[in-house]
């Protein structure tokens, strides 16, 4: 997705949780607590991955994409497939996507990443293209056309 921006990766936090689990400071019941809603979202809207569950090591993880934003109104907080995200990004100004990994076997779940999508990211790309065209010695007419 071209307009993906402000990406936050939670892999360090995941490693810390797994380290705490292996050290015995927390139990598997503390980390394998996926709600029935999350498990259903993974089943119907999730994207299967090739990564094994770090807890049970018997199932592949599934990624679930949740969307939030002011323009979504009643749709905020819903799980969407990855294929739906580019369509929403072209129609909405800006919304946040939270990616959660879920194990269907042992109920492990963890926030993987979060990022912004939407048309506002395209405006920044157009501005960058205009600036580079001006730097190349474009005429004033071309600059006016690019700003429209």
Image: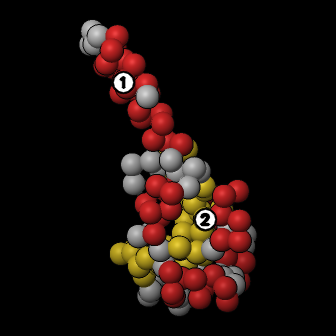
| Secondary element at tag 2 | strand
The image shows residue 60, relative to residue 82, as above or below, that is below
102 sits to left or right of 73: left
| Residue 73 percent across, percent down from the top left | 71, 65
> Does residue 54 show up?
no
In which quarter of the view is residue 38 placed? bottom right
Q: Residues within 10 Å of mark 1 (few under 14, many from 20)?
A: few
| Residue drawn at point x = 36 percent, y = 24 percent | 145
| Residue drawn at point x = 66 percent, y = 58 percent | 71
Q: Residues within 10 Å of mark 2 (few under 14, many from 20)?
A: many
- Marks 1 and 2 sit apart, C-alpha to C-alpha, by 35 Å
| Residue 34 percent across, percent down from the top left | 66, 82
| Residue 64 percent across, percent down from the top left | 53, 74
Which residue is at the front of the view, 101 or 130?
130
| Residue 131 percent across, percent down from the top left | 39, 19
> Does residue 87 show up?
yes
The image shows residue 109, relative to residue 134, as above or below, that is below
Which residue is at the front of the view, 130 or 54?
130
The image shows residue 111, relative to residue 57, as above or below, that is above
- Circle on res. 67: 2
- Circle on res. 145: 1
The image shows residue 44, relative to residue 52, as above or below, that is below
| Residue drawn at point x = 44 percent, y = 86 percent | 59
């Amino acid at each position: 997705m071209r307009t993906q921006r402000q990406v936050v990766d939670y892999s360090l936090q995941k490693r810390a949780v797994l380290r705490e689990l292996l050290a015995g400071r927390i139990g598997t019941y503390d980390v394998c607590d996926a709600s029935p809603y999350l498990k259903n979202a993974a089943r119907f809207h999730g994207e299967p991955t090739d990564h094994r569950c770090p807890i049970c090591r018997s199932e592949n993880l599934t990624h679930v994409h949740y969307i939030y934003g002011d323009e979504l109104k009643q749709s905020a907080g819903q799980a969407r497939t990855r294929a739906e995200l580019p369509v929403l990004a072209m129609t909405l100004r800006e919304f946040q996507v939270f990616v959660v990994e879920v194990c269907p076997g042992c109920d492990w779940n963890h926030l993987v990443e979060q990022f912004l999508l939407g048309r506002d990211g395209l405006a920044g790309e157009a501005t960058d293209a205009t600036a580079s065209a001006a730097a190349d010695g474009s005429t004033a007419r071309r600059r006016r056309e690019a700003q429209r």
